[in-house]
Image: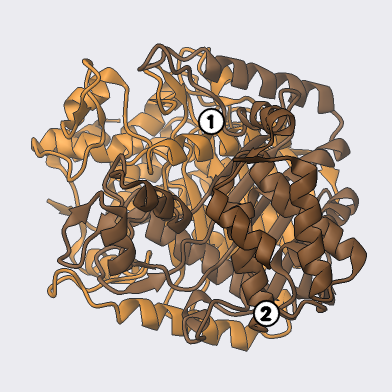
Chain colours: A orange, B brown
Amino acid sequence: MRIPFEVMVDQFEKVLLLRGMDGPSAKLSATLIAETSLEGVYTHGANRFCFYVKNIDDKVVDINARASRVDTFGALERWDGKQGPGNLNAHICMKRAIELAKGHTIGCVALANNSHWMRPGTYGLMAAEEDCIGILWTNTLPLMPAWGGKDAKVGNNPIVFAIPSKDGPVLVDAAMSQFSYGKMETYKREGRPLPFDGGFDKEGNPSRDAAAIMESRRPMPMGFWKGTSLSLALDLIAAALSGGMTTQAIGKEEVEKGVSQIFIAISLSNLPDREAIEEKIAASLADLKSSIPMDPSNPVRFPGEKRKTLREENLRDGIPMDERVWEKILEL
Amino acid sequence: MRIPFEVMVDQFEKVLLLRGMDGPSAKLSATLIAETSLEGVYTHGANRFCFYVKNIDDKVVDINARASRVDTFGALERWDGKQGPGNLNAHICMKRAIELAKGHTIGCVALANNSHWMRPGTYGLMAAEEDCIGILWTNTLPLMPAWGGKDAKVGNNPIVFAIPSKDGPVLVDAAMSQFSYGKMETYKREGRPLPFDGGFDKEGNPSRDAAAIMESRRPMPMGFWKGTSLSLALDLIAAALSGGMTTQAIGKEEVEKGVSQIFIAISLSNLPDREAIEEKIAASLADLKSSIPMDPSNPVRFPGEKRKTLREENLRDGIPMDERVWEKILEL
């Protein structure tokens, strides 16, 4: 089935208002989550709305708490998320990082005690819309073993790079595991094997079986040893700068809560050669797209390129939705 | 054979002085390159000294040029490397980023027109020594295809994260290809297969044969599609902020020259809870090291952990060196 964008926003808004969220926040949160599905990131939008509401109902998320500034250190600020709604807190902090970037050209907000921020790319797009480069990441609870280890010790710590361009933002949104749990969930549901080894089964054998990997909690890091190392670095930086928890500390909680996040914005408008920058980005993207494809029916695209088309399609035809999930959302 | 550290520094210094480099620069450059081998990063130290000197002899590198500031934008500065020696320019810019970080907590130097900076990790360690987090990267000439493409379009664009810790810096130094050309060169020389598919051969088949991959110029990106996307983002950011060349533009040159680089430093000393930060980093590293290892004889280590031991060993016993390479260096 397909749900019109406005219907989805209205339904999410209604559910959040019912739980006591203030009007503007409910509208914003509903819009951010529906837009995620609208742009084709189905794993992190409407399909996670029940999880979002469950965390509110379970008091893991404090529906009325919002991030506030703790301290300022030049171009870097520390904020405390107070376990409020993760997407609203992240929205506040990215907005502030952009303001800092307008003043200092580079600005950084380090946020402690946040809840799950839903789709990471959302905040990268905010930066790009304000003519800023956005670099942001989060830590998570321990989700995968370090390379060479068996037990989950590091997060999958997604990182986002967003770069404005006249063809639409270049948007890289990558977890440090080769496949996100959301993606593995999809393969599991559809009973398909992963296209590459995505982890280890309980016996320690490399595997393409999403269900077996989710059971063993041993997904493969992106780039093997490289993914683990990058994940650790992102975690330590986020916790150090925000004054918040590391993945190791989050792992002691019963559920994931109190994650640490970094929002860096760099203002391109502050630079004198803005037009030359535009041209060199366009030339790079055109060159990339001129790649000789391995599969002639599948031309090389830049990351984020499909977003606009998907958005238009889903605005026109409605957002593809699993009927059972939508039924659940209507009952919330 | 093993060469004492001091002998190596003296030899490099002599060669550079002979070519007209000023005394302090020759000393610094020689030390940086010898220290790379001292710390066990054999691919990027003494083994590349002939390449470093060849670029000077071929006038690809201007031995007398040094990076200078072009413009200041708050906490971000633009510098021009003028095609001077890459390691000396990077040293100047990292030093400046650290100064900016001491003032603004976060500081960024964007460097255009640099030459190959040799070992990326060198500048991360500089940041850590000044109690800063270091985040730095470079673009390169096109070295690998975009995911789904056949012809080399993106750089391998190494990125470094360095984080001070009481157990020695956490140091992540990762190219966006699964295996660096330097590493593949080693496997090729030793006639060993790569431990994982490292690229495609000329027929487009996934391959562990380093020689075949180097010939096809089709190394595998780290994390498949993720490595290509990250590489593109790092490239565009470096070129945009520095005002320098993208990978695409560098590809038009006959040899790699005029790369764009980013040096970000974040001062931990500026934060009020420095001690708590130390403790949470130590707890994370201890937890990581307590992983149940897949191979009991091979405990999990944090990135950068082996550095100190290797350094001590090589200081005591001399630096392992291929006799033929050392002979060539003596003839320079």
* Residue at disc 1, secondary structure: loop
- In front of the other: A47 or A152: A152
- In front of the other: A217 or A59: A217
Question: How busy is the neighbourhood of tag 1: few (under 14 within 10 Å), some, or many (20 plus)?
Answer: many
Q: Classify residue A32 as left or right of residue B278.
A: left
The residue lying at 52 percent from left, 61 percent from top is: B157
Q: Give the mark toward the camera: 1 or 2.
A: 2
The residue lying at 47 percent from left, 81 percent from top is: B251
Question: How busy is the neighbourhood of tag 2: few (under 14 within 10 Å), some, or many (20 plus)?
Answer: few
- Disc 1 to disc 2, C-alpha distance: 66 Å
User: How many badges with numbers are in the image?
Assistant: 2
Q: Label 1, on which residue?
A: A63
Asked if residue B94 shows in the view, the reply is no
Residue B22: x %, y % from top left: 89, 70
The residue lying at 85 percent from left, 51 percent from top is: A74
Q: Can you tell which mark lies on residue B122?
A: none
Q: Label 2, on which residue?
A: B57
Whether B26 is drawn above or below A207: the answer is below
The residue lying at 44 percent from left, 50 percent from top is: B183
Q: Quadrant of the C terminus of chain B?
A: bottom right
Q: Amino acid at mark 1?
A: Ile
Residue B266: x %, y % from top left: 77, 46
Residue A135: x %, y % from top left: 58, 55
**Chain designation of label 2:** B
* Residue at disc 2, secondary structure: helix
Residue A317 image-quadrant placement:
bottom left
Q: Amino acid at mark 2?
A: Asp
- In front of the other: B267 or A127: B267
**Chain designation of label 1:** A
